Amino acid sequence: MIERKPLLMLAAAAVFALLSVPSVFLSRAAKRYFNFVGHWNVATVKSSRSGIIPPFRGRQWGPREIPQPELRFVKFSVKMAGAKEVRIAADFNKWNPGSLALVKNGKNLWEALIPLPPGKYRYICLVDGKETLDPLNPDTDIEGGRKVSLLTVK
């Protein structure tokens, strides 16, 4: 006959294993999903509703709409053989390479999809910590004395 204490310990270990294994897969899926944020496939996003400014007291104006910026989804694609990590540092993320990591999508393809308003943006790719220009974008500019890639979102 099995004693009660070892039986309870075995049951607790089984429950722990059943709960921890799915959480590992869930955390990996969540990490991949949230790293979508960061070559140029552009789509338009318009706001679903517009904001209204109340009229100024003392004037008989009607409500005015607040202009909403149109966003474009910009897809960053970098093809690098043998890369272990690819990140983007740019003026739209305050040159912080930790804020936009690309996700490996295929053997040598790294991608990220981020919303940006129209404008010109300077950026640099960090492949395994080494700064490189985007090999698929010939447009360049100078930022802080170094040559960087230039992206124009229309």
Image (cartoon, helix red, strand yellow):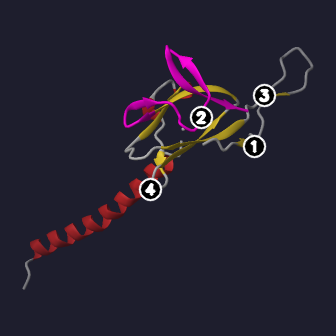
Identify the mark nearer the N-term, 2 or 1: 1
Q: Nearer the viewer, mark 1 or mark 4?
A: 4
Q: Residues within 10 Å of mark 1 (few under 14, many from 20)?
A: few
Residue at image position (60%, 43%) is 39
Looking at the rendering, the stretch of residues picked out in magenta corresponds to: 126-154
Q: CA distance from mark 1 to mark 3?
A: 13 Å
Q: Nearer the viewer, mark 3 or mark 4?
A: 4
What amino acid is at disc 3?
Ile
Q: CA distance from mark 1 to mark 4?
A: 28 Å
What amino acid is at disc 4?
Ala
Count of numbered marks: 4
The x and y percentages for residue 131 are 43, 29
The x and y percentages for residue 8 are 16, 71
Element type where label 3 sits in the image: loop
Q: Nearer the viewer, mark 2 or mark 1?
A: 2
Question: Which residue is identified by label 1?
Answer: 48
Question: Which residue is identified by label 4?
Answer: 29
Question: Which residue is identified by label 3?
Answer: 66
What amino acid is at disc 1?
Ser
Q: CA distance from mark 2 to mark 4?
A: 30 Å
Was residue 33 drawn as part of the magenta stretch in this picture?
no
Relative height, residue 6 to residue 38 (above, below): below
* For residue 101, side relative to residue 70 (left or right): left
Element type where label 2 sits in the image: loop
* For residue 119, side relative to residue 140 (left or right): right
Q: Residues within 10 Å of mark 3 (few under 14, many from 20)?
A: few
Q: Nearer the viewer, mark 2 or mark 4?
A: 2
